[in-house]
Image (cartoon, rainbow, N blue to C red):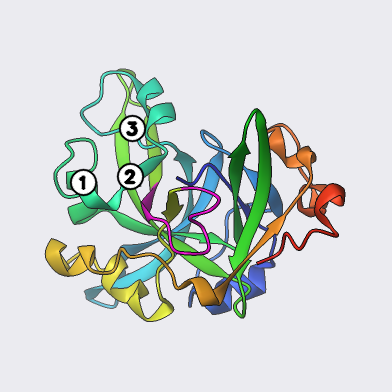
């Protein structure tokens, strides 16, 4: 699964990496992004360019936890923070969003917890060579009885690769940079081809580092979340 992640980067880095040309919403570096919180996402929107509509990449904040448009209760989103790639095209809560409302969720790392008896050891996982990357995401719009609009998203997950498997059986889908266009394209409804993009990122291109207990609480924020676990420093808990 994916239940926490980091995005501690600059406007300029985000703008260049995702080829954005619009103004950003208010944004600050985050070291412990958690479900139900606002998360930065990239999507394609139609923008009038002269007399024609062109697709442009735009950023927005979504609430993390997908609320389907047909839901009667927005609290459902707290249970739908992740969408399994294997059932994405069939599950009622996700299939329409998968077909028509896909997004990128920028990140520079994510956390996962390895269970050992009663203890849970947190790991921060990042890419070995790239600072930034993007999770495959889907989003939806929910309209409340009083006309309020709630935009929400979920992060797509898949089976763990060799690096992640000793830590957890699932991992978020990290899209290849060359696949961003196909994933975001609102006209692309070839779900079979899209599903082929939703595979585990190669183990050899990732690094996992044991971090301290500070990150365990979703209430904690700041660079202290990334401090290496002192009890692990001499035990090679970096792989």
Mark 2–mark 3 distance (CA, rounded to whole Å): 12 Å
Question: Percent x, y for residue 41?
Answer: 47, 55
Q: Which residue is mark 2?
A: 83
Read off the magenta span.
155-168
Mark 2–mark 1 distance (CA, rounded to whole Å): 8 Å
**Quarter placement of the C terminus:** bottom right
Q: Are marks 2 and 1 in contact (CB under 8 Å)?
A: yes
Q: Which residue is mark 1?
A: 87
Q: Earlier in the sequence, mark 2 or mark 3?
A: 3
Q: Is residue 190 visible?
A: no
SS state under label 3: loop
Residue drawn at x 87%, y 50% as measured from the top left? 230
Residue drawn at x 75%, y 50% as measured from the top left? 211
Asked if the stretch drawn in magenta spans residue 119, the answer is no
Residue drawn at x 27%, y 34% as measured from the top left? 68
Q: Which residue is mark 3?
A: 67
In the image, is residue 148 above or below residue 151? above
Which quarter of the figure has residue 116? top right
Q: How many marks?
A: 3
Dominant secondary structure, magenta: loop
Question: Percent x, y for residue 162?
Answer: 47, 64
Of circles 1 and 3, the one toward us is: 1
Which quarter of the figure has residue 56? bottom left
- Is the residue marked by circle 3 packed among few (<14), some (14-19), or many (20+) residues within 10 Å? many
Q: In the drawing, does residue 231 fall left or right of residue 32?
A: right
Closest to the observer: 163 or 136? 163
Q: In the drawing, does residue 134 fall left or right of residue 27?
A: left
Question: Percent x, y for residue 231?
Answer: 85, 48
In the image, is residue 190 above or below residue 155? below
SS state under label 2: strand
Closest to the observer: 239 or 65? 239
In the image, is residue 42 above or below residue 113? below
């Amino acid at each position: 699964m994916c239940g926490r992640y980091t995005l501690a980067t600059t406007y300029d880095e985000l703008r260049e990496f995702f080829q954005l040309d619009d103004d950003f919403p208010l944004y600050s570096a985050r070291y412990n992004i958690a479900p139900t919180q606002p998360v930065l996402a990239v999507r394609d929107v139609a923008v009038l360019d002269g007399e024609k509509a062109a697709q442009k990449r735009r950023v927005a904040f979504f609430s993390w936890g997908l609320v389907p448009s047909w839901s009667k209760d927005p609290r459902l989103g707290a249970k739908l923070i992740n969408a399994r790639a294997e059932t994405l095209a069939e599950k009622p809560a996700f299939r329409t969003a998968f077909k028509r409302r896909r997004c990128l969720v920028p990140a520079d790392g994510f956390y996962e917890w390895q269970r050992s008896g009663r203890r849970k050891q947190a790991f921060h996982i990042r890419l070995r060579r790239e600072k930034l990357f993007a999770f495959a995401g889907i989003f939806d719009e929910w309209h409340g009885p009083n006309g309020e609009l709630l935009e929400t998203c979920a992060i797509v997950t898949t089976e763990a690769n060799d690096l992640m498997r000793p830590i957890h059986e699932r991992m978020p889908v990290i899209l290849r940079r060359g696949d961003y266009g196909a994933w975001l394209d609102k006209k692309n409804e070839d779900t079979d081809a899209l599903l082929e993009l939703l595979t585990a990122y190669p183990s050899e291109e990732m690094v996992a580092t044991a971090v301290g207990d500070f990150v365990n609480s979703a209430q904690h924020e700041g660079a202290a979340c990334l401090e290496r676990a002192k009890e692990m420093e001499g035990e090679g808990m970096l792989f």
